[in-house]
Image (spheres, grey):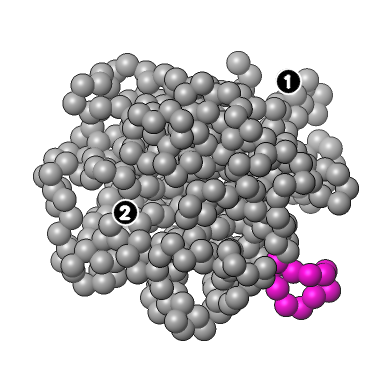
Amino acid sequence: MTEYEEAEHDTFAAVQLSEGRSLAPSTEPAETSTAQPVWEAPAYDFGSQSLPPPPRWCVDGSAILTTSEDRTVRVYFTPDSATSDPAAELKPYLDLPQAAPVLSVLWYPTGTPSAPGGFCFAATIRDSPVRLIDGLTGLTRATYPIVDHRERFIAPFCLAWNPSATKLYCGHENAIEVLDISAPGYDTSERIKTTLTRGDKGGQKGIISALAFSTDYSGSYAAGSFGGSVSLYSEDEAGAVGHLEGVEGGGVTQLAFHPLSPNHLFVASRRSSLLQVFDLRNPTQPFHSFPRQASSNQRMSFDLDPWGRWLAIGDETGKVGIWDVGGGGQWGEKLWEAQVANIGDAISSVQFHPLKPSLLVSSGSRHVDLRIADSDSDSDDSSYEDSSESGDPYLAGSSGRREQSINGRTGADDHVKAGGMRAGLGILDFGQSV
């Protein structure tokens, strides 16, 4: 194992909060000390992989879909805290290496191991067609090529199923591709252009980085771009029907409609200290904002529980907080906060369990070690090449190799060498305190 591979070696741990911690509103400020851990938990071992796109539970929470920086898609069965052995390593029952980085994965909305016919997921791999993969066997059920004007395959950056789960919406540069799941192959998709020409002052420019359908089953959906814009669309219309104003940050990374109040749209952006909430009846400005620390380009996902009661947010300091957004208390009030990850490791995603009071939390961020490398070393050169090929679109600006001036000197002998990705996967169980 090379020096770079050792630095890139990651460890997953599933953690479980001690019972008795309440979600009642707290009147005391959050603890800032990290000398003592805030939970006592078994340490499930998910292996040594890192997680660029967020891991996701299937519809009943019985399986976990993960992707990693080693270009591999893995599927785990959710461990049972009552019967599983924390000391045993949890092996994925599906391990699917890919030829290129995985940009996005998404479960089929009704997919569960108890119904094998619908247990599948969509995956986008760079320079490859969109694939529909069986969740039990790992075999490709169908492929959906998206081709540009130069006959190159386009890999979408984000995915979303329509309410009837018959079409898959894919976001890429200046367009949204609509795939009919029942019609795989070439020339079967519909392309919605978000901007007509390069010189067009209107429309939605840039890579479509986030998609979300309204929870009222009306066919309305929102699209966000890395250009920082959010527009509203409808399945019945060919173009945008509205736009949001006042979106902050350096590019939209996630959108979500409130499960019980479809007029409320939650918007998360990179390099932003706020998670904004818009009322679509007045899209000129956000009506509420939740604080979070997110100063980098890394995607940090939030989640709303299926009943619309709570909002879970992670930040770049390793903390996870839960806010009331319809649970009967004061709307927007912080209910709970804990230091979940190590200091310096961002919470890259959180997701509520569909049926149980648990959170699926992934943490990790790229740690860069600045040092001058010896250009005559063959091992160092090979490690640079390996790291540069693993380009991660979810961590823009954190490439493995970068030319830089050091102490006024520039040239091939001066490099910034990445220290690797440190990541973890955890299950926070709130027990009977909900």
Residue indicated by mark 2: 306
The first of marks 1 and 2 along the sequence is 2
Q: Please name the predominant secondary structure of the magenta segment in the image.
A: loop
Specify whether residue 110 is in view: yes
**Which residues lie in the magenta part?**
194-204
Specify whether residue 371 is in view: no
* Residue 247 quadrant: bottom right
Residue drawn at the location 75% of the way across and 24% of the way down? 382
Q: Position of residue 240 (x, y in %)?
A: 63, 72
Identify which amino acid the numbered label 2 is placed on. Pro
Q: Position of residue 246 (x, y in %)?
A: 54, 78
Residue 246 higher or lower than 58, as above or below: below
Q: Residue furthest front?
A: 182
Residue drawn at the location 50% of the way across and 48% of the way down? 165
Q: Quadrant of the N terminus?
A: top right
Residue indicated by mark 1: 379
Q: Nearer the viewer, residue 372 or 233?
A: 233
Residue drawn at the location 67% of the way across and 58% of the way down? 176
